[in-house]
Amino acid sequence: MAFMIARRSFVLLALAACSRAPRFLDYNGPEVTQIRVYKTERRMELMHDAEVLRSYDIGLGFAPAGHKQRYGDGRTPEGEYTIDRRNPQSLYHLSLGISYPNEQDRARAEAAGEDPGGDIFIHGRGRGNRFVRGDWTVGCIAVTDSEIEEIYSMVQTGTPIVIYP
């Protein structure tokens, strides 16, 4: 009987760990003045002027080479954008919206007769993707749930983000 109770407790703890609610952390350090994403290196840096405050390994869209052209292409955009929204109730734990598509992206897609897509975020893994590795998003930038909690506390709406090839 004690074994069954211990086993049940372990299972409940494991399930709770998988569905942990986001933590909203306090950050009192230097302002993040820019985010830099290096797609080839799968790295993201939070900058304060020329100083790297934090660096993260990232996952990208499932077809990471090249700039996002249209809805559904699985690419992560390249270029200069801003963080334009915060989602504390994201399906991917927490998320920060990227201002894709910009004017040039919309014009390029319109000229090609295509939808540029949108809803590009920096986000965690969320419930179903906890152990996923590599490039798996539909164009977003993915980090772990713990990392997005830290990033979410550090980055404010309006922060510039540059995404390099």
Image: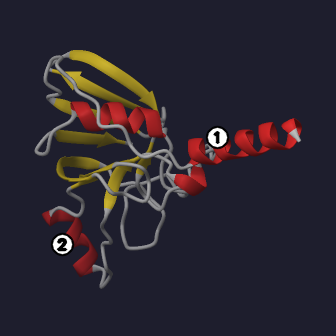
Q: Nearer the viewer, residue 88 or 15?
A: 15
Residue 41 located left or right of residue 84? right
Q: Amino acid at mark 1?
A: Leu
Image quadrant containing the C terminus? top left
Residue at x 53% of width, y 58% of height: 63
- Residue 66 on image: x %, y %: 43, 54
The residue at the far front in this view is 1
Residue at x 26% of width, y 54% of height: 97
The residue at the far bottom in this view is 113
To which residue does mark 2 refer?
A: 107
Q: Nearer the viewer, residue 92 or 24?
A: 24
Q: Vertical placement of 77 versus 111: above or below?
A: above
- Looking at the rendered image, the disc whose residue lies closer to the viewer, 2 or 1, is 1
To which residue does mark 1 refer?
A: 13
- The quarter of the displayed image where residue 127 is located: bottom right
Residue at x 42% of width, y 49% of height: 93
Q: Nearer the viewer, residue 32 or 145?
A: 145
Q: Residues within 10 Å of mark 2 (few under 14, many from 20)?
A: some
- Residue 89 on image: x %, y %: 33, 57
- Choose the circle earlier in sequence order: 2 or 1: 1
Q: Residues within 10 Å of mark 1 (few under 14, many from 20)?
A: few
Query: Which label was assigned to residue 24?
Result: none
Identify the secondary structure beneath mark 2: helix
Identify the secondary structure beneath mark 1: helix
Residue 71 located left or right of residue 101? right
| Cα separation between marks 2 and 1 | 50 Å
- Residue 122 on image: x %, y %: 35, 47
The residue at the far left in this view is 158
- Residue 1 on image: x %, y %: 89, 42
- Callout 2–callout 1 Cβ contact below 8 Å: no
